[in-house]
Amino acid sequence: MRSRRVAALLALSLSSALVLSACGGGGGGTTGDAQGAPTISVYGTEPENALLPGNTREVGGSKILDALWSGLVDYDQQGRPQNKMAESIESTDSQNWTIRIKDGWTFHDGTPVTATSFVDAWNHVALKTNAQSSSEFFSAIAGFDQVNPDEGEPTAQAMSGLQVVDDRTFTVALTEPSPIFVNTLGDVAFYPMPESFFADPAGFEANPIGNGPFRFESRVPDQNVTVTRYEQWGGEQPVAVGGVEFRFYADSEAAYQDVVSGNLDFLESIPGSFLIDNLYQQDLADRNGNQPYAGINTMTFPVYDQRYADPQLRQAISMAVDRQAIIDNVYNGLVQPATGFIPEGVPGKVDDQCGELCEFSPERAKQQFDASGFTGPVELISNVDSAINREWMQAACVSISNTLGVPCNFVPVPTFSEFLDQRRAENLTGIFRSGWVASTPTMEYVLAPQYTTGAANNNSGYSNPRFDALVRQGSTAATPEEAHALWAEAERLLIQDMPAVAINDQSAQFGWSPRLADVELTYGRELDLEKVTVQE
Amino acid sequence: MGRYVLRRLLQLVPVFLGTTFLIYFMVWALPGDPLAGKCGDQTCPPAFVERMREEYGLDRSIVVQYLTYLGNLLRGDFGENFRGQEVATLIANAYPVTIKLAVVALVIQAIIGLTAGVLTGLRPGGFLDNVVLTATLFLVAVPVFVTGYVLQSVLGLRLGLIPPTVPADPGFVDLIVPGYVLGSLSLAYVARLTRTSIAENLRADYVRTATAKGLTRSRVVGVHLTRNSAIPVVTFLGADFGTLMGGAIVTEGIFNVRGIGGLIFGSIQRLDGVVVTGVVVLLVMIYLLANLVVDITYALLDPRIRLD
């Protein structure tokens, strides 16, 4: 009697479990929406700020903005600007530019995109009292120092260098000639804004309205943002996917499992643990890619610390790092060693600028190191809460220690925010991890923010007036070719001074579900949503 | 009984003040800059930083910050995190998921654990007892993240029976595997606790009396024995439910469950004191209330226990 009842209970719970789990199967992508076109899901992280182009500088937010907006220009995979909303961007002197936009583009609320949409948006971002994180992107435009002075309140509300000519034309006057002005225009900071934004900013944040191929649909905090195809989009049709869900993950390993099983359609950064032995190439056979992007991994010296003030010592440490060993052991050969400070993929890059100074030359390194009289252990510092920072820095440490015969300690900092705090306060007393992605594809954007005197991201405290002058001359050169030559010269100077050690160029390993085809990565390391197609 | 409950409820007030202050202070004291990630890898412009610090009150002293927070909290305003999201919304989104997960875990624990415990307890030393003993030993020995990753890759990837992660708004069905992973450890304890308790009470006077009265075996075991033996198990389950409500960082991470555990973990990493304090205050309240309920349940299970 008793056992029969227990058996019945067991049977009941078992069978219900089976039924329930049967319902649980499936999942995967959803279909429907914009005229039956399929919706795809893409890996994302929670945006750090409200979805505003002028106030977004991190990847979680900009990925979504790039779907919602189209800029004047777009970068091809080689980082060259291609007209998108712009019909023409012309100048005779590289200083006074006339921008004409294409006809027939509308925002998602139906209002036309006009010259005013750009001018008002740019003025809004530049104005100091609006405290937008991208304000510096407009510093080359005449009148920027009135709307965003270093000290005190702004004396003007709009930049004098921006003038609307007619509905589709506006002019931009720069304070100095800039041969690469067009190359900067693809950044999210330069996206246009509809009138409704200026009328009701708070309402706009909750429901952003752009001019891109997809319009905003919904946002659930810590879960996802969904967008659907905008049928009246002015860009190149057709766009195959009907909508995109940017699904937020706390842990990219979970996202990876989802891509393998087809539960998520795209992941642009395979987590480190699946790069080991190229495991991801087995898990995602025929649906993975490895593509360099314009980023570089470096180790920066605390030049402000007297012990590291000698360039000869800094060069010695650079030559003591066996880059190929790091690449083979940590990155499985998926990245290339750096041969200069400009990453591959940035227009104007000169190959092999560094020569022996960025190569593993143990003898010369040891000789130069001993001559410098450096005492005490070498310390390498990195935050250890993301990617494979710890692994490659430890490998570098082993290499330095073996080559130079001094102890090398790896000093972990638990979180990125602590690391930033210490970096800002110049409390880092060892060589620290750094990296740069040329999100604006110009050599200037690699050199100026990191290495010119007092620049915002110059964390080493490095300063060389000759270098500063060369970078500036390049920025105001008459042609891009002249600019590139000057910047290349600046880079050579930088290599001699070696405020940082260039380790490797970056590369993205990405994977997708069986239902996607025509998968391409954009210059900005995002899935090209305008080209991707879905097979059902 | 009424006075007892009232007294216990009043105790919540100092606990509330103490925990909110401690948690708020501890998150504030963590090293690092809470605005660090706002501009990606780059340095934010000074005007932006200044505005943010002002907006979130970071320019004021910790005591002022805490009192402002407490004032808002008493008016029912949980505040905003550094990403500009309403903390109340975050909690409202995450809590149902966590509750569902906890309930699934608890049900699995109770069904499997109690069944195994009663069956083995009635015949200690038998074959089934040895099987369960070994099985529970195994469950206790294996850490949760191993169980989690193994089940995820075997059931999710190799066999394709379940999706490897749960959807944004999961149903009970989606949570069976994560719930099992979460409950597996406690399941073993429940089984062992029940077994010991049953085995012990089997020799108790009241069981002999009940049998002597001529009651059927099923009534003796089902009503008298199991009910009495359930007391330590219910204590354990109650405490465990409180713990489960705090979320399960590891399990939620593996299966991408958007619950409370992940919310707290992420917020601590981002030094988001407002979220951490808000969630923890709720947790403390729930924990205390759950314990109160357990204490009251004692009285209902065993008429010899009186609360006053």
Image: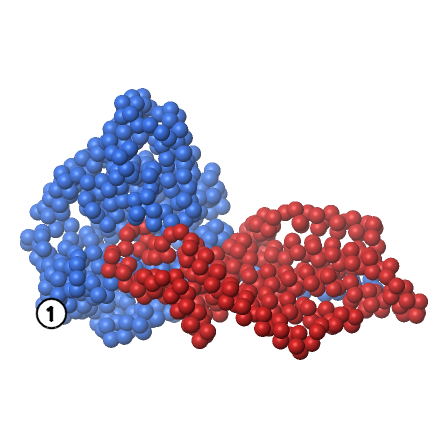
Q: Nearer the viewer, residue B205 or B135?
A: B205
Tag 1 residue: A166
Comparing A200 with A98, the one in front is A200
Please determine whether, in this image, residue B272 is positioned above or below residue A385: below
Instruction: Locate residue A117: give its quadrant.
Output: bottom left
Chain B: give its colour. Answer: red
Residue in view at x 49 percent, y 53 percent: A254
Task: From the top left corner, tell me how far across and down residue A250 is, in percent.
Answer: 45, 56
Residue B11 lies left or right of residue A500; in this view the side is right
Q: Quadrant of the N terminus of chain B?
A: bottom right
Q: Is residue B72 visible?
A: yes
Q: Quick check: A150 left or right of A427?
A: left
Chain where mark 1 sits: A
The residue at the point 66 percent across, 77 percent down is B3
Look at the image and tell me in which quarter the C terminus of chain B lies: bottom right
Q: Residue furthest bottom?
A: B2
- Three-letter code, disc 1: Asp
**Residue name at image x 45 percent, y 67 percent:** B90
Give how far across and how far down residue A68 sits, in percent. 31, 64
Q: In this rendering, is residue A173 above or below A392? A: below
Q: How is the image coloured?
A: by chain
Q: Position of residue B302 (x, y in %)?
A: 77, 69
Task: Please indicate, yes or no, whether residue A108 appears anywhere in the rendered image.
Answer: no
Determine whether A479 is above or below A246 in the image.
above
